[in-house]
Every structure is written in C-alpha cells, then in structure tokens.
Image (cartoon, helix red, strand yellow):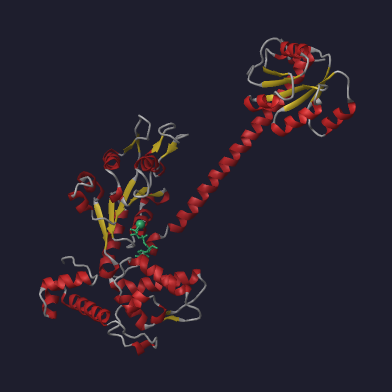
Amino acid sequence: MSQQSESPSSNESAPGARRFGILLLDDEEGILESLELTLGDEYRIHSARTGEEAPEILEREEIALVISDQVMPGMSGVDFLERVKERRPQALRMMLTGYADLGSLTRAINQGHIYRYVPKPWEPDELRLNVRRAVETFALQEQNSRLARELEQANERLRRENVFLRREVERRYAFDQLIGESPAMLRVFDVIEKVAATDATVLVTGETGTGKDLVARAIHYAGARKERRFVAQNCGALPETLLESELFGHRRGAFTGAHADKKGLFELADGGTIFLDEIGETRPGMQVRLLRVLQDGEIRALGSSETRKVDVRVIAATNRDLRTEVAERRFREDLFYRLRVVEIHLPPLRERRTDIPALAHRFLDQVGRKMARSLEGFTQAAMERLLAHPWPGNVRELENEIERVVALSGDATRVSVDMLSEEIRGAGETSLPAAEDGSGAVVQDLNKAVDSLKRRMIEEAIRETGSKSRAAERLGIPRQSLQKMMKRLGLGGDDD
Ligand SMILES: Nc1ncnc2c1ncn2[C@@H]1O[C@H](COP(=O)(O)OP(=O)(O)OP(=O)(O)O)[C@@H](O)[C@H]1O
Ligand SMILES: [Mg+2]
C-alpha cells in the first residue's frame, strides 16, 4: 500500500492536528484503548461503551467521524450509525467489524449510512489513512456548506441593495414632484435650486404634511451629491442609544445585543446627504454629538475610541418651533445656528391656497392612475370647497382626501361636492347655493355657515389690501378683533 508516501510519519501530528473530534463506540474496553492509541495523536477522541452515551457526546462535541463496532449488546452498529446520521448528518460514519455481517453491512453502505468499513483486526497505518481521508471529506463538506451560506448571505445583501437603489431611483425626481404656484412656493423653489448647488446645512421647517420630506430629497437630487446616497433618519422614532448607534454605528459588544460591528448612517451617507427628520425631538446628549459632526465632520462609533472623518451634507427638518425650543432650553442654541445655515420654511397650505387646484389635479391624476379610475376634474363647487377648507393636515390631508374620493367615486366622471368628506363639504357653503352643482347639499348649521362666510371675507380683504391692519379697516373692526377671529377660524393669527 502507499500509505507510507501519504503519511510519511504517521505518529507526527498532521497540520491542524486535533482540530477534529472522533467518537468511538465499542463495548470492549481493549478495542477502545487500541483505537485511541492509533488515533489519539491526531484527533480528539471521545469514547463510549454503549449507544446510550453517544447522543450526549454528539450534542456537546464537534464530531467529524464516528467509528462504531458492529456487534454490541442491545443495538447493532448499523442501527446506531443510522441514528447518528439523523442527529448529525454531516459527520462521517465508519463501521468496525470482526466478521462481515454482509447483509446489513451492504445495505447500510448502499443507503449511504456509512462511509467505509474497517475489518478487525486492523492495520494501524491503514486505519490512520482511512480516517484521514474521512476527515478530509468532512472538512471539505464543511467548507462547502460554509461557502454556500456565505454566498447566500452575499446574495441577500445584494438583493437588499437592489431594492434600495430602485427605491432611490423612484424618488430621484422629487423636484418634479414638488407642486406649487403660490408666490411663497415659488420662493421656496428658488432657494432649493440655489442651495442645492452648495454643501450648506439646511433646516426645513413647517407644519406636518407641508412637504418637508419632499423638499429634503429635492435638494439632494438637484445637487452634485445626487449620485451618492440620500439616507433619512427619523430622530423622534428611537430611544437615544439606538438612535446613536443608527447614526454613528457601533463596535461589537458596545451594548447588549451588539453582536457585530455596524456601520452608521453618517458613514453610509459619506459623499451624500443625511436627512435628520424631527430634529426637534433629539435629547441633549444627541444634540452634543450632532454638533460635533457639524463642527468637525467627525464621527465616533459607539464603543470605539477612534474618530473618523466623513463628508456628509446635513439636512434637518422639524415641525416644532425651534426658536421656542431654544428659548425654553430644550434645544441647544449652538446646534440651532449650525443647522439653520439656510432655513426653508414651508407655509401651511391654508396660507397658499392658490396651490390647491394644481395639487388637487396632480393627486387626482396620480391616484386615478393607481386605482385605474379616470376622473377628469372637479366641479366648480367642489373646487370651491377645497379652496375654503383650512387643511390642518396640509398637503398630506389634501392627498388623503383625494385618495378617499377616488376610491369611492364609482362611475362618476367629475368630483362633485357630495363626494367630498363632511368637514370639507361644510367649508364655504354660504356663498355656494346648494343648487349650483346639483349636489343637494344644504346649509344646516347657521354658525358654520357664518364662520365660513367670515373666513372668506377676511381672506379676500387681506388679499386685496395686502395687510391685516388695512383689512381690519376695510371690514370695519379693530385689528385685535380681526387677529382673534382669524385664530379661531384657523386662518393663522401670525403678524404680517
Ligand atoms: N408641494 C408638493 N407637491 C406635491 N406633493 C406634495 C407637496 N408637498 C407635500 N406633498 C405630498 O404630501 C405628503 C406629505 O408630504 P411630506 O411627507 O413631505 O410632509 P412633511 O412635512 O415631511 O410631514 P411630517 O412633518 O408629518 O413628516 C407626501 O405624500 C408628499 O408627496
Ligand atoms: Mg416628514
């Protein structure tokens, strides 16, 4: 045989010696001892006298190979190895047999339950060689399945990356999605365009639903960083430590549950833009860390002592009044000034009602396409109601209203007053006789009707005179009364 050339010094340990475990099962102590003598130098040997001891060893130890005697009291070796196969399919199995019980042995080999059988008595060198081959086979199988697992994980990562890229492409055209014709929005577009060409930090403010998200994306995708990532994080959604780990990353073991190193969003956004939404919700500790990034462009992962430079443009947004937050010491003044290098304020929809028709038509088209309904527009009366409603939820509320209308539109071809929801139907009803669009809507609540009329008159007076003081004069009431009335009617009592 050629074992001499394969194992030139079979007593010396092979590379990676004793890395692999072998389980020996035999009821004769003497056999176990001599097997241990033959194999103990190269492998970790675990011996068992009965089949009952074996499962625990298989459970506890990394076993590459099981060598079992064929004839034992209680259970045959073939049966035992079959059970091993169920428990640890990856371990190879060898049978030691004194006289060939050919029937069961051939069956076992043919069914793949055992890898090889060793005749008793054995040649030590031959046994060593056979065991070495078995262990190599085991190691190859292990490597194979590890590689397969890694490949699967890599595929999964790629798939996720793909989904991310596709979604970003869909959002790319955020600027085209921004609709507005009011002077206020035209000014906003102008600022977006100018600021997009720079790396300046931007603070976007405005009530909920005014389009802060959309504006942040528009700035990113209109600028030089558009080929790199735009990542968004809602700072109000997570407890402080988790938020810190999301933004700055963490090292393995930084806190319970940190099983591996993790990159933070600042690092992922390197070269691109990070959007810190709801910045007004951050706690003082987080504010200090953000200040540091804005000042030095440096981040430090949780649990790490090293800092790292990143090149990230920061856009922040909030629907809180940060000046009040600063005055009441909930928000750091230095951070506030660092953030609002440029501030873009999005006025509530009720202060730019001229945007309503364009927005309503855009949503009608969009939603109509999505739901496969084609409505060609609004009746004049319906549009007037949309124009008169105060829209506390701003553009998002308008979008939702249109979605609701389209979903319930049946076979209507135009949106009429009776299709609008009740709060909106109520708006502006005084100046609109119920008969006008045949909806049959009638003025049922005198107070509501009067409010609606007042709202209209005030808005008109302000529009035509250009200031609240002159509007008050025209309406024949003191300025303070006008202020109060506007507040109550949801017209925004801010000074002009
Ligand atoms: N000017 C606009 N043109 C077209 N769609 C808009 C406009 N402004 C807002 N929208 C749409 O209105 C919805 C709400 O906008 P967005 O999520 O940007 O608001 P937000 O200010 O971030 O609100 P929140 O403070 O609640 O997060 C979105 O579906 C957005 O696409
Ligand atoms: Mg938002």
Image-quarter location of ligand 1:
bottom left
Q: Quick one: quadrant of the N terminus?
A: top right
Q: In this view, does 415 lie above or below 290?
A: below
Q: Residue at x 37, y 31 (%)?
A: 304
Q: Which residue is drawn at 35% across and 30% down?
A: 306
Q: Where is residue 404 in the image (x, y as percent from the top left)?
A: 44, 71
Q: Position of residue 110 (x, y in %)?
A: 84, 33
Front in this rendered view, residue 54 or 284: 54
Residue 428 visible (yes or no): yes
Q: In this view, does 352 lie above or below 266?
A: below
Q: Residue furthest front?
A: 74
Left or right placement of residue 35 versus residue 57 in this view: right
Q: Position of residue 200 (x, y in %)?
A: 28, 49
Q: Residue furthest bottom?
A: 435
Asked where in the image residue 365 lies, by quadrant, the reply is bottom left
Residue 89 visible (yes or no): no
What is the number of callouts on the image? 0
Q: Where is residue 448 in the image (x, y as percent from the top left)?
A: 27, 79
Front in this rendered view, residue 414 or 446: 446
Q: In this view, does 49 lie above or below 438?
A: above
Q: Quick one: quadrant of the C terminus?
A: bottom left
Left or right placement of residue 4 versus residue 189 in this view: right
